[in-house]
Amino acid sequence: MTDSNFYPLILKAPLKDYIWGGTRLKSDFGFESELEKVAEAWVVSCHKDGPSIVSNGSLKGKTLEEAIEIMGSDALGEACKDFDRFPILVKLIDAKDRLSIQVHPSDEYARANEGDNGKTEMWYVIDCDEGAQLVYGFKHSIGSDEFKERIESNTLDEVLNYVDVHKGDMFFIPSGTVHAIGKGILIAEIQQNSNVTYRVSDYGRLGADGKPRQLHVEKAIAVSNTNPPLDLYGKVGKVTINDGSTVRNLAKCKYFDAKLISLDGSYEVKNSTSFVSLVIIDGEIELESEQGSYALKKGESVFVPCGITLTLKGTAQILSASV
């Protein structure tokens, strides 16, 4: 590792055109694509299904995973030593239409059955249509037999917990939580570095090939927590007011520590035990460090190696994730 290879990495996101996606990631966030729909932008990703690409400095053109290998384990920090791969995946998601009813497995189940991590995640609602809703677990406890019967009889909606959604809401979704993003919702998602999803129901919707999309009912039943969720959601999270910024703690677990930085002036980013990822979800900033200065706008993201101190200046909303 040389000093010239240890610096904040500005990332280019791979884009996904799932059938439920819209156009706001292009029109509102400036992502350039020939795709008609852009459902997701994987703004911080080391996953094989869509790696982020470094767009600045000596590591330009490398995947984020390749760049981290060149920088060495110091770039991730001591907090990441127990992870066998880069721990998180950060997405921007534009749900023009509703997503399938789905669930993600635990680490233990996913590693035994899929060769991948499990998936605990959190959502931050950037914007939404009036009256938008999402599915967040069950209204009351049901057994596995009833869960299966309701899937087969198409009555699952009667026991799902539909929640009204508002701009600025946060939802923490542990693995095993049955959930679905509703139509008209634009979110930022921080999750484990995994792409394992079990569909419970997709409303009979047809995929791009004209056939019903695959369901994974038996696996979903095996991994689902069929009790109501216990975590608080909505306008939750301790807020700290600083000179030039406000920081809201969104969610913290063993996989990630997520914060929302509301910048109106300046804010110092420093972490001696973990990398930090920053995604600009509104506004523009100047990022200053000993390694260089960069201008970042809405939709752009940066990977900050552990131990690098940054000063952020401007007026913006920034999603921060570390371990």
Image: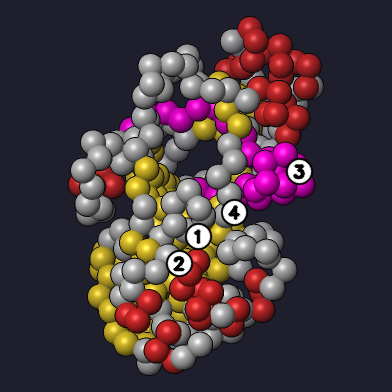
Q: Which residue is mark 1?
A: 46
**What's the distance in space between the residues labelled 3 and 1, CA to CA?**
21 Å
Tag 2's secondary structure?
helix
Q: Amino acid at mark 4?
A: Gln
Q: Is residue 289 left or right of residue 321?
A: left
Residue 130 vertical placement versus 246 (above, below): above
Task: Say which mark, if any, is on residue 192.
Answer: 4
Span shown in magenta: 96-123
Q: Residues within 10 Å of mark 1 (few under 14, many from 20)?
A: many
Task: Say which mark, if any, is on residue 112.
Answer: 3
Residue 10 belongs to the span the image colors magenta: no
**What's the distance in space between the residues labelled 3 and 2, CA to CA?**
27 Å
Residue lying at 50% horizontally and 78% vertically, measured from the top left: 70
Tag 3's secondary structure?
helix
Q: Quadrant of residue 84?
A: bottom right
Say which of 150 and 19 sits in front: 19
The quadrant of the picture occupied by the C terminus is: bottom right
Decide which of tag 3 and tag 2 comes sooner along the chain.
2
Q: Amino acid at mark 2?
A: Leu
Residue 105 belongs to the span the image colors magenta: yes
Q: Quadrant of residue 205?
A: top left
**Can I make out residue 199 in this image?**
yes
**What's the distance in space between the residues labelled 1 and 4, CA to CA?**
11 Å
Decide which of tag 2 and tag 1 comes sooner along the chain.
1
Decide which of tag 1 and tag 4 comes sooner along the chain.
1
Tag in front: 4 or 2:
2
Residue lying at 48% horizontally and 69% vertically, measured from the top left: 66
Q: Which residue is mark 2?
A: 64
